[in-house]
Amino acid sequence: MVKNRIVKDRLAQGVMFSLTIVAILFVVVMAIGLYLKSSPVLEGRSLFSLLTSSVWKPMKGEFGFLPFIVGTLWVTFLAILISFPISFLTAIYLTEYARPVVRKFVFPALDILAALPSVIYGVWGMLVIVPWISNNVAPHFMEFSSGYTVLAAGIVLGVMVIPLLVSLFIEVFTSVPAELREASLALGATRWQTTKKVVLRKTLAGVLAAVVLAISRAMGETIAVLMVCGCVIGIPTNILESCYPIPALIANNYGEMLSMPLYESALMFAALILFAVVLIFNLLSRIILYRIESREE
């Protein structure tokens, strides 16, 4: 009996280890595949020129990815700037202050928002956000704007990210033991002081990880952003100009480039850029988390 249990334990350990390796290999295979598909556009062109050039003329073989990179960063960070304070304060309220009856209604609403297809957010952005920007916001700063702007894409994407961030923050905050809260309150601290000095300090690493995960999620969003960003090739200098993020570039042009191998390679290189940026963000977050945890120890 003991021998059988040991064999089963080792077998289970081996299976789980194998599945872990497979999961890691998926990432490696994706990176290799994107690189191989991108290699034609890299032949005869330096990586620096591809990343820093603003000229995009596929018919002439000129591929400058800087406008798409800048557009992706503009939209992503604006979305996080909008969604973070709303999500953060909502999660604090729901975990530290809200009554059970409030949570009973709010949690299903968040689940519904998270489950909505991205195209619905895109349609909402076109019908509500774009006209609002065109008619009410832009006239204060410029003569005319179509409304299909960085701001529209950032608002739509920010609303999409809110349910994810709220759920992650709630999970992080509820991981703090109740005994720590009770001890703080017993010492005479107010509920806000307990939240600030105990809960937030204890969950700093988790909050950072949640934000990085939301950034990764936002960078890859396609349909909703595609519908409201304007899809104009150029480097936006403010949030009331149109932009062209990398996911929108791939989704808009992939069907057109089948007869142009070099164009296909350029789009695969765009996907490789997005893959690399998300990977770098996640690695940086892991490094920061490790340092924070090391200081706490």
Image: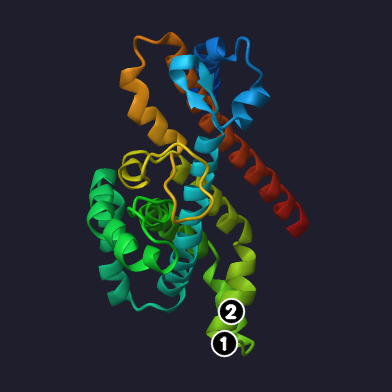
The residue that mark 2 highlights is: 194
The image shows residue 179 at horizontal and vertical percentages of 56, 73
- Image position of 168 with respect to 184: above or below: above
Q: Amino acid at mark 1?
A: Thr
Left or right, 246 with respect to 280, comes to left
- Image position of 31 with respect to 43: above or below: below
The residue that mark 1 highlights is: 190
Residue under the image location 64 percent in, 87 percent down: 187
Is residue 168 visible to us here?
A: yes
Tally the marks: 2
Q: Amino acid at mark 2?
A: Thr
- Image position of 5 with respect to 113: above or below: above
**Counting other residues with Cα less than 10 Å from the Cα at mark 2, is it few (<14), some (14-19), or many (20 or more)?**
many
Mark 2: which secondary structure?
Answer: helix
The image shows residue 155 at horizontal and vertical percentages of 39, 57
Q: Are marks 1 and 2 in contact (CB under 8 Å)?
A: yes
Residue under the image location 49 percent in, 43 percent down: 71
The image shows residue 291 at horizontal and vertical percentages of 74, 50
Residue under the image location 24 percent in, 54 percent down: 124
Is residue 18 visible to us here?
A: no
| Viewer-closest of 284 and 152 | 152
**Res. 129 image quadrant:** bottom left
Left or right, 53 with respect to 141, comes to right
Q: Which mark is residue 43?
A: none
| Viewer-closest of 240 and 219 | 240
| Viewer-closest of 218 and 5 | 218
